[in-house]
Amino acid sequence: MKEKKRLLVKKLGRFEYGAALKLQKETELAVKDGKQPDTLLLLEHPHTLTVGRRGDNAGILKSPELLRLVA
């Protein structure tokens, strides 16, 4: 009979985007290295504007000055 896989669920609440990304990368490595089971991170972070690796600022309608004010 097949062994049942475990799923670790972590309810983390609110995290800053950078801290959440760091935790996600650390969790990914721990799962890949077999140090913890498959893991689901449940969290939220403040509104964040991101541009993908191949993206550009053409779709951003606010000025850089205004964006710095709300950061």
Image (tube, grey):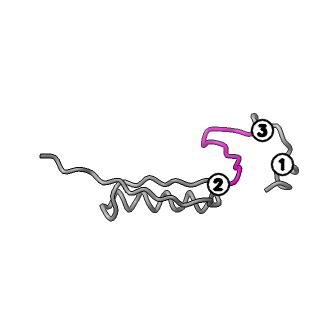
The answer to which of marks 1 and 2 sits earlier in the sequence is 2
Circle on res. 45: 2
Residue that numbered label 3 is attached to: 60
Q: Residue at x 82, y 54 (%)?
A: 70
CA separation in Å, label 1 and label 2: 21 Å
Choose between 67 and 57: the one closer to the eye.
67
Front residue (pair 27, 55): 27
- The residue mark sitting in front, 1 or 2, is 2
Specify which label sits upstream in the sequence, 2 or 3: 2
**52 relative position to 61: left or right:** left
Position in image of residue 42 (x %, y %): 52, 53
Marks 2 and 3 sit apart, C-alpha to C-alpha, by: 20 Å
- Which of the labelled discs sits on residue 64, or is there none? 1
Are the residues flagged by discs 1 and 2 in contact, CB closer than 8 Å? Answer: no
Q: Callout 2: 10 Å neighbours few (<14), some, many (20+)?
A: few
| Image quarter of residue 55 | top right
Label 1 neighbour load within 10 Å: few <14, some 14-19, many 20+: few
Q: What element carries label 1?
A: helix
The amino acid type, in three-letter code, at marker 1 is: Pro
Quick check: is 22 in the magenta stretch? no
Question: Label 3 neighbourhood size at 10 Å, few (<14), some (14-19), many (20+)?
Answer: few
The residue located at (56%, 57%) in the rendering is 21
Is residue 47 found inside the magenta-colored segment of the image?
yes
The kind of secondary structure element at disc 3 is loop
Q: Where is residue 49 in the image (x, y as percent from the top left)?
A: 71, 46
Image spot of residue 51 (x, y percent):
66, 43
Query: Magenta residues, as a range?
Result: 46-57
Q: Is residue 54 above or below residue 11?
A: above
- Quadrant assignment for the C terminus: bottom right
Q: Which amino acid does label 2 sit on?
A: His
Majority secondary structure of magenta residues: loop
Q: Are marks 3 and 1 in contact (CB under 8 Å)?
A: no
